[in-house]
Image: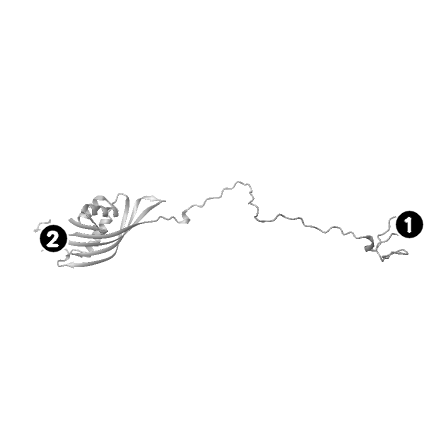
Amino acid sequence: MSTAIVLPTLSAWAASHLSGLLESKTQAAFNRAFDATFASKLDATVNGKHLSRDQYKQVLLDQSGAAPLEADASVQIEGQTVSLGDQGQLAGLVGLFYTSLDDSKYLVLGAPVETRTLSSINMTIEPTEKNPQPPTLHIRGYFDPRRVTVVNQIFSESTLHVTIPASSVPAQKAASTGQVELGPDPLNVPPKQKRSLPGVVRLPPGEMGAGPETLPGFGAFGVGPAIIPGETVGDIVQRGA
């Protein structure tokens, strides 16, 4: 009794093969994945330009993690559509839309440069390979004859900018010399002017009502008190004129 192993659907086959191809780590793994996905006779068109099989292989290699300057790659399938042929899941047309992120081996400001690729790819898949297993083998289904015979791909690449959070940048300490430096003088400030204070007011004797001082003994008893007009000193009254 033989046991049949069910092959994956056409869309699942295309998505898994493309992801495994672009996420390859080494050149040898990439070569095996490419030969297991694309037929030996391949009709390839990329961004409207017809390419040979080897040229298309180099395009995918540059987008993969096996590229000489890349350290890692991850693929995210954003959408897919399928149109089956007359052979069921063995043949048909598959369309995929995916995003891939590639990290460079080289660092810029301490972080790897990341490249993002947006792509839409349409693949015609046919059972082109012959089963190498002998017909007497009682286990069937290990061989997958499907390969991509026609591919039409459109893609664009962009480099993501590297940014460093401000919190990771050490603050510089201000150098202190111990000397006090004064800043520049204020602008447009007029110089200080001397405040004029009122001087001593001198009035003529006629305005103050002062008169000749007459004291008893005509000064023989010393200097008398200050005479204010209208004040009485002894029997003498000084009045303003």
Question: Position of 112 compared to 3: left or right?
Answer: right
* Location of mark 1 (residue): 218
Identity, as a three-letter code, of the amino acid under mark 2? Ile
Q: Quadrant of the N terminus?
A: bottom left
In the displayed image of the protein, which residue is found farthest to the left? Answer: 136
Q: Dividing the picture into quarters, in which one does residue 207 lie?
A: bottom right
Coloured how? one colour
* Element assignment for label 2: strand
Task: Measuring from the top left, give residue 113's x and y in whole percent.
Answer: 32, 46
Q: Nearer the viewer, residue 78 or 152?
A: 152
Residue labelled with disc 2 = 139
Given the current orientation, which residue lies at the most extreme right position?
A: 217
Point out the tag, 1 or 2, that comes first from the N-terminus: 2
Dot 2 alpha-carbon crowd within 10 angstroms: few under 14, some 14 to 19, many 20 or more: few
Determine the residue positioned at 21% across, 44% down: 28
SS for dot 1: helix
